[in-house]
């Protein structure tokens, strides 16, 4: 996993909704940056998506910048193609960019393993939290609240350090293009 304290890897990717390129530097004025690797087909993402959209809207007023990135191979998983990304973003009312990582280089730079997976960077753009949104999973009966992500953001926005004990995300593995699989997967 990407070690805590690691500087945020730079990115510049197309936003499937606006068509413009969005880069990590576009969020320099925000006190926190959350990079979320998601996709359209994964049942774990579908399960938390409404709660995630609400969370992003709630914390935007407090200065959190959110960007979602889909890294999946669209040949093997056409439901994750940019046109469908645009449809989902509009349907769900995304208030954040939904970027397509066609080369999968950004996912590799972040050492992303699954969708959903979350990387929260502090004011200095150092990785402060990498883990789950909350303990809810499809079928486990726990409501989607975003409790762990909300607590991490609240703590960082208050200028306090986070504990190093963090629960990793659980979800669908990233669908790497043939021959592109990183050696750490």
Image (cartoon, rainbow, N blue to C red):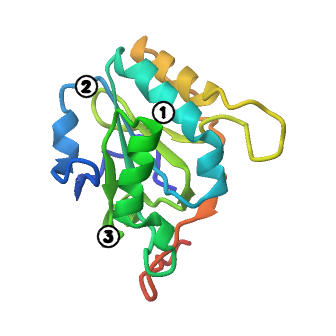
For label 2, the crowd category at 10 Å Cα-Cα, with few meaning under 14, some 14 to 19 and many 20 or more, is: some
Q: Between residues 115 and 54, which one lies in front from this camera angle?
A: 54
Q: Which residue is mark 1?
A: 53
| Mark 3, secondary structure of its residue | loop
Label 2–label 3 contact, CB within 8 A: no
Numbered circle sitting on residue 102: 3
Q: Which residue corresponds to mark 2?
A: 30
Please tell me whether mark 2 or mark 1 is closer to you in this view: 1
First in sequence: mark 2 vs mark 3: 2
Task: From the viewer's perspective, tell me whether residue 129 is left or right of residue 157.
Answer: right
Q: Please tell me how crowded label 3 is: few (under 14), some (14-19), or many (20+) other residues with Cα within 10 Å.
A: some
Residue 59 lies, with reference to residue 130, above or below; the image says above
Q: Point out the frontmost of discs 2 and 3.
A: 3
- Residue 185: x, y in percent? 56, 72
Q: Position of residue 54 (x, y in %)?
A: 50, 26
Query: Horizontal placement of 56 versus 45: left or right?
Result: left
Question: Please, is residue 28 above or below residue 24 in the view?
Answer: above
Give the label, 1 or 3, closer to the camera: 1
């Amino acid at each position: 996993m990407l070690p805590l304290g690691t500087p945020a890897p730079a990115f510049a990717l197309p936003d499937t909704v606006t068509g413009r390129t969005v880069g990590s530097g576009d969020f320099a004025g925000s006190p926190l940056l959350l990079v979320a690797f998601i996709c359209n087909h994964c049942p774990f993402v579908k399960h938390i998506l409404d709660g995630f959209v609400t969370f992003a809207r709630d914390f935007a007023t407090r200065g959190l910048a959110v960007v979602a990135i889909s890294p999946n191979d669209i040949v093997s998983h056409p439901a994750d193609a940019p046109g469908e990304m645009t449809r989902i973003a509009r349907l769900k009312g995304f208030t954040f960019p939904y970027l397509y990582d066609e080369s999968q280089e950004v996912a590799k730079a972040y050492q992303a393993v699954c969708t959903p997976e979350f990387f929260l960077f502090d004011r200095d753009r150092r990785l402060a939290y990498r883990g789950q949104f909350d303990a809810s999973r499809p079928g486990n009966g726990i409501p989607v609240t975003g409790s762990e992500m909300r607590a991490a953001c609240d703590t960082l926005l208050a200028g306090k350090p986070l504990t190093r004990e963090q629960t990793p995300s659980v979800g669908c593995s990233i669908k790497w293009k043939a021959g592109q699989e990183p050696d750490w997967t």
